[in-house]
Amino acid sequence: MNARIWLTGFEPFGEHKTNPSQELVEQYLNSTCIHSPRGVESGPVEMTFLGRILSVDEAGSCLSLTHLDGVDAIIHVGLNERAEKVRLEMCAANLCDFRIPDNSGRQLQDVLISSSGPNLLQTTTPRAALAAAFLGNQFVEISEDCGHFVCNETYYRTLHAIRQQSLDSEKKEIPAIFVHIPSFEYVSMEDQSEILIELCAQIVQRI
């Protein structure tokens, strides 16, 4: 099996001249790798990484919606300025409440992402299995708060589109998750790369 993964990072925003999520993701875009997920008996999985570096604005938050067909999993990666660990985000909130303007100048305050969507959407990845897979990893934590900036907006739009696609077509929901990463000062690029590949493999071997 070759799993096609839609993988995204973000361009720099705010006062940041670079974005670690862009640096991390660009290593893998348009490449294929084989990895054996830990604790799984099914053996190695082959993964082909498609995707984009997203703009930090409304257009970027919507871009992935046109690529849901033909992929087996979706992994969004973004920088959390306050994080000191890699955070696996378990849910997205139906709310934009920006502390700073995005890269298009929007600074939404207490605005719904979808007027018809639920207040909260959960990851479509196997939550319990991922928590178990990274149990004891000092660099990883499970998070229930994706914030209210463009990262959360992107995640919510993706989960909402997957939900609607599943309801409309009765297809199985595509596994999707958002990963917030810290600066490489706290967790090195090498360690973050290992976590990302392990995460992808854990998800796709259960498809």
Image: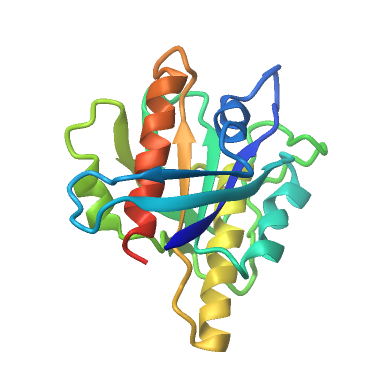
Q: How many labels does the image show?
A: 0
Left or right, 130 with reference to 96? left
Query: Is residue 89 among the parts visible in the rendering?
Result: no
Q: Return the residue nearer the eye: 165 or 69.
A: 69
- Eyeballing the image, is 101 above or below 188? below
Residue at 82% across / 39% down in the picture? Answer: 104
Image quadrant in which you'd find residue 111:
bottom right
Query: Is residue 159 among the parts visible in the rendering?
Result: yes
Counting from the top left corner in percent of width and height, residue 37 is at: 28, 46
- Eyeballing the image, is 122 above or below 165? above
- Eyeballing the image, is 169 above or below 25? below
Counting from the top left corner in percent of width and height, residue 200 is at: 41, 48
Residue at 54% across / 70% down in the picture? Answer: 162
Image quadrant in which you'd find residue 122:
bottom left
Counting from the top left corner in percent of width and height, residue 152 is at: 55, 48
Residue at 36% across / 55% down in the picture? Answer: 203
Q: Return the residue nearer the eye: 190 or 113.
A: 190
Left or right, 31 with reference to 17? left
Residue farthest right in this picture: 104
Instruction: State the colouring used for the structure image.
Output: rainbow
Residue at 60% across / 26% down in the picture? Answer: 23
Left or right, 66 with reference to 3? right
Counting from the top left corner in percent of width and height, residue 51 is at: 64, 49
Report the quarter where the N terminus lies. Answer: bottom left
Report the quarter where the C terminus lies. Answer: bottom left
